[in-house]
Amino acid sequence: MIQTPILKPGPRQDGPHPDHAAAGRPQPSAPVVRIENLVKRYGAYVALHEIGFELKSGEVVAIIGPSGSGKSTLLRCVNQLEQPDGGCITVAGQRFEGGKEHSRAALDTLRRTVGMVFQSFNLFPHMTILRNVSIAQERVAGRSRKDAEDRAMHLLARVGLADKAGQYPARCSGGQQQRIAIARALALDPQIMLFDEPTSALDPELGLEVLAVMRELAESGMTMIVVTHEMRFAENVSDRVVVMADGRVIEEGPSRELMRDPKTERTQRFLHAVRDR
Amino acid sequence: MEALTQLARGVPWTIALTLTSFLLGALLGLGLCALRLSSSRVLRALATGAVLLLRSVPPVVWLFIIFFGIGFGYVQLPSFLAAMLGLALITAANMAEIYRGALSGVHRGQTEAAIALGLSPRHRFQDIVGPQMIRIALPSAATFAIGLLKDTSVASLIGVQDVAFQVNALAQRSFSGTGIFVIAALLYIALSLPIAALARWTDLRLRAKVAR
Ligand SMILES: Nc1ncnc2c1ncn2[C@@H]1O[C@H](COP(=O)(O)OP(=O)(O)O)[C@@H](O)[C@H]1O
Ligand SMILES: [Mg+2]
């Protein structure tokens, strides 16, 4: 049975998950994600120029920057939705070198370690909400239908949507859909969660309910990388902010410091532009 | 009256031929579609060539080729089998194109979400992309199936005793005037109605689930 409280403080400190132990779960404060000299090209166009940064276990990093600066590309490289052309990404002790093929097993482990939430939710429209959250547990983790559904119900309750379990995604508001997408991504007990502009497709008030779930998740100790235009989230919830422009990291630092007193002129301009909106 | 019972004797053959060739073709079409989208350039080219070839030769010519050509001398395929095979191949080519169009209608984000969840390629298709593809393909597939029902009439030319065969036989014995052709026409329409109804019903049922 799966009894792990998901959004409660001190996640999964109670005995290591067997799979994570096998993958060499890093000690707290050791980097759980390390990105070195990451390069990604689309044809001749260089989307990421030698990006580097690290993420410690339990840390929440916000990535901000103008549209087209490579934020999504960077995030998608972390779980190998995009194959980098150069550099190296280490996730939970497992190295993924750019320009190389990776074994099925390595990718499977990676995707169990890393959960992802998309801007457009991408719920499966032909499945009930319960099924959306339980399917991968059965197919990937090999849980029984009952265990998977118990766990799914538990997660849906945590995001406040247990009453929607039997319905189809189209019947839910955007905010509800995104909360379901978060529950779906949490269902395989990831160590790291990636969010790609999770509230950009939502009306502001619907965005708030999603941000509230994300804040709770952050407070529970989840390691998170969040691409966002929500400056308040970046400042108040994340530990660190990474600013990207033109495929490069142009500035990075503790959130409050960086948001209040950006060092580079480019970041200042960007923050002005966003805040004026 | 006697004419009617003779016509009715063709009905099971028409139904059987439509059903078997459609089901076989829909299945083969899935494989053909997969080949068309394969990463091997050779396989892709072969599949594209096969689709083009199958679709640009009229069904009746295919049936003659299969029935007289392949059966020539050594193996004589029974006419029903030959007709079924020919129509199934044509169905496969058409269904492959219908599937391909439907696949491009499934949002790319669906596959990405499935990959991010760690679903294997098989489960990505079986659980996520396949059902959505079929839902999109359904109306075109039904239209094709109704066309196929009518096309089965060419099987009468190689001796399958379907509705068209019986009409022809009756007409040659000058049993009745134009009346028999009208009845045959009504019969084909009647047979196509359940296909249209089934497609509509399934479509509505699926749509009800995904729509607001
Ligand atoms: N699949 C792709 N093919 C070609 N160019 C792409 C592709 N994906 C992204 N790009 C380009 O890479 C750059 C960075 O894109 P992206 O990472 O989506 O930016 P952001 O998320 O910061 O808005 C953009 O200029 C975009 O046009
Ligand atoms: Mg983006």
Image (cartoon, coloured by chain):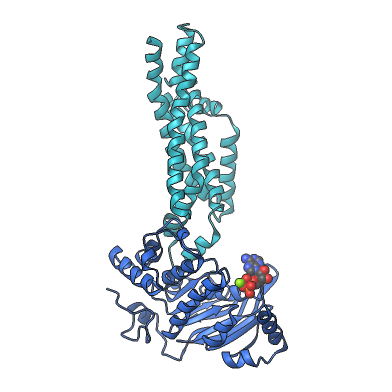
Chain colours: A blue, B cyan
Residue A41 visible = no
Nearer the observer, A161 or A22: A161
Nearer the observer, A235 or A209: A209
Q: Residue furthest top?
A: B174
Left or right of B49 in this view: B126: left
Residue A153: x %, y % from top left: 34, 68
Left or right of A271 in this view: B113: left
Q: Is residue A215 above or below residue B155?
A: below
* Quadrant assignment, res A135: bottom left
Residue A5: x %, y % from top left: 34, 79
Residue depicted at 40% across the width and 25% down the height: B13
Left or right of B67 in this view: A17: left
Residue A210: x %, y % from top left: 49, 74
Q: Quadrant of the N terminus of chain A?
A: bottom left
Residue depicted at 54% across the width and 79% down the height: A226
Quarter of the rendered structure image containing ligand 1: bottom right
Residue A132: x %, y % from top left: 41, 63
Residue B74 visible = yes
Nearer the observer, A191 or A26: A191
Q: Quadrant of the C terminus of chain A?
A: bottom right
Q: Is residue A139 above or below residue A217?
A: above
